[in-house]
Amino acid sequence: MMAAKQHVPVEINLTADESFDVNKAELKPAAKIKLKQLAEQIKTYTYDNIVVTGHADHTGAKADNQKLSERRANTVFNFLVSEGVPSATMTSSGMGSSQPVTKPEDCNMLQGKKLAECLAPDRRVNISIIGIKNK
């Protein structure tokens, strides 16, 4: 009997610009398209689990950022479930602003729209598919 081919974990990142408006947790159309494609792909594999993690930038109160990151992760989780991905195989959590992609000096001295644009990489949802094997 031939063993299933093991694949490296798959990481999908939904960036702020394509996924959510600032301070919002509703998916934009581009994110829905990307997630529909991902759900179809997932159905062609077996896997151990899927981890959905939301992130926020450092602007605003820490507690608010934590809640926003959790809402974003839950939105992605629920969308994947609506597309046929079993909820029992997934977990979701929010990291708030604790894991930024940008460095403090990257956006230093910026304000308003320019600051929001600079910090956009920190506002994201990561989806990790762990233990993927061909069916």
Image (spheres, rainbow, N blue to C red):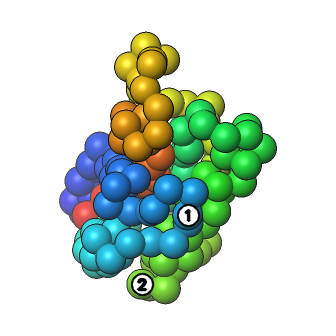
Q: Is residue 35 left or right of residue 77?
A: left
Residue 65 appears in view: yes
Q: Nearer the viewer, residue 65 or 99?
A: 65
Amino acid bearing label 1 = Lys
Element carrying mark 2: loop
Q: Is residue 108 left or right of residue 72?
A: left
Q: Is residue 18 above or below residue 110?
A: below
Residue at horizontal 73%, vertical 40%? 61
Q: Residue under circle 1?
A: 24
Q: Is residue 102 above or below residue 83?
A: above
Q: Is residue 57 left or right of residue 13?
A: right
Residue at horizontal 50%, vertical 68%? 76
**What x and y, as percent, mark residue 105?**
43, 14
Density class for disc 1 (Cα within 10 Å; few <14, some 14-19, many ≥20) is: few
**What x and y, as percent, mark residue 57?**
54, 38
Element carrying mark 1: loop
Residue 70, by quadrant, is bottom right
Residue sitting at the far top: 105
Residue 89 appears in view: no
Residue at horizontal 44%, vertical 62%? 20
Of pointers 2 and 1, the one earlier in the residue sequence: 1
Amino acid bearing label 2 = Glu
Q: Residue under circle 2?
A: 83
